[in-house]
Amino acid sequence: MATHRKQPKERERLKVWVHAGGHCTICHRYLLESGINFEYVRLGELAHIVAQSDSERAPRGSVGLSKEERDLAENLMLVCAHCHNDIDKESQAQRLDAGWLRELKKRHETRIRAATGLAEREMTVVLRLVGRIRGAPTEVSALEAADAVNSLLDRNPVLTLDPNRRGPEIDLRSFPGEEDPIDSGYYETACARIDQILVERLTPAVERGEVPHLSVFGLARLPLLVYFGSRVDDAISTEIFQRHRSTESWRWAEDVADVQFNYRLQEATNADRPTEAVLIVNASGTIDSRQIPIRLACLPSFVIEPEHSEPNRDVIRTQRSRDSFHDTVSRL
């Protein structure tokens, strides 16, 4: 007759889950949510550092611990099924000894306690939007985002909107039709994906009070960035990060002069009480007025451009330059 292995006491199991923060101690995967449909699923398993059995064939079973000590939280790790199987393989159990696993458990639980112990005002939720630009895939890694946040904000970056901690929260790179976005329906498909992530992940997190601050990183076609910006709730305190072309860095420059922006009005040529206007933004480049469609040429035009500086592809390199552009748009 088969015998069922005795489970550690509920009190000890609870300690392990809380100390691990619901994440795998080894690969850090979140273990309370399905990676398929994001429903609540309990995926974690409790692994013994020193096996419950003192048999020499059990993983690290010959280490000297009493029977009672083997089922205490100090000897248990929260892991995913894959990592559990990995560390208990006979060949691995010889290499990954009890001391190494205890140190791994200690480091993981220390990180969890430090992260969850931070004041809410020190947190910022990272939200990355990544697409293709002129056919080339772009990338914003979690490491890049964390480095930029740590260097520019007095906040701790968290990836609560990315359950698997593997890719960007909004990934548009796999959608076909980017080379001809208007005729292929690329924009419609991409906008629908943006809405899906914002509705299914960001909005519920905001309602649960998990987003005290938002750090946004975006690399995609400009119409998609504009649409994304229009869909993010402006009630959330948000910091926008920019990839600087000259350095390929997300950090704002500190050793360059600030650029001030302003706007001017070009009067309409022959429009009678116009109800529309044209906005021309000369920032990364200059718009040739001859390229404006004839049907719009008669409308009044507002031009936003840098003062005392020529537009160029890296004209906004400092936070103060960014703020000046923002203020100009707001005044307009």
Image: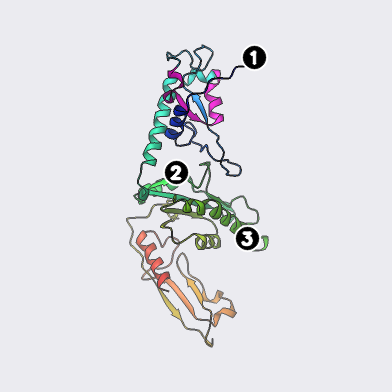
Outermost residue on the right side: it is: 184
Which amino acid is tagged 1? Met
- In this orientation, which residue lies closer to the viewer: 306 or 116? 116
What residue is disc 1 on? 1
Image coordinates of residue 186 in percent, x first then y, are: 63, 58
Q: Rounded to the nearest whole Å, what is the CA distance between mark 3 and mark 1?
A: 60 Å
Q: Amino acid at mark 2?
A: Leu
Q: Is residue 327 above or below residue 247?
A: below
Q: Quadrant of the N terminus?
A: top right
Magenta span: 68-90
Which quadrant would the C terminus be assigned to in this image? bottom left
Badge 1: residue crowd in 10 Å (few <14, some 14–19, many ≥20): few
The residue at which mark 3 appears reads as 188
Residue tagged by mark 2?
Answer: 143
Tell me the quarter of the picture where residue 290 sits.
bottom right
**Secondary element at tag 3:** helix
Residue that appears at 45% across and 30% down: 16
Mark 1 secondary-structure assignment: loop
Q: Is residue 63 above or below residue 168?
A: above
Distance CA(mark 3)–CA(mark 2): 30 Å
Sequence-first disc among 3 and 2: 2
The residue closer to the viewer here, 124 or 146, is 124
> Is residue 86 inside the magenta stretch?
yes
Q: How many marks?
A: 3
Res 133 seen here: no
Which of disc 1 and disc 2 is earlier in sequence? 1
User: Are the residues tagged 3 and 2 within 8 Å (C-beta)?
Assistant: no
User: Looking at the rendering, which quadrant does residue 12 occupy?
Assistant: top left
Residue 37's disc is none
From this view, report whether residue 89 is shown above or below residue 20: above
Magenta stretch containing residue 65, yes or no? no
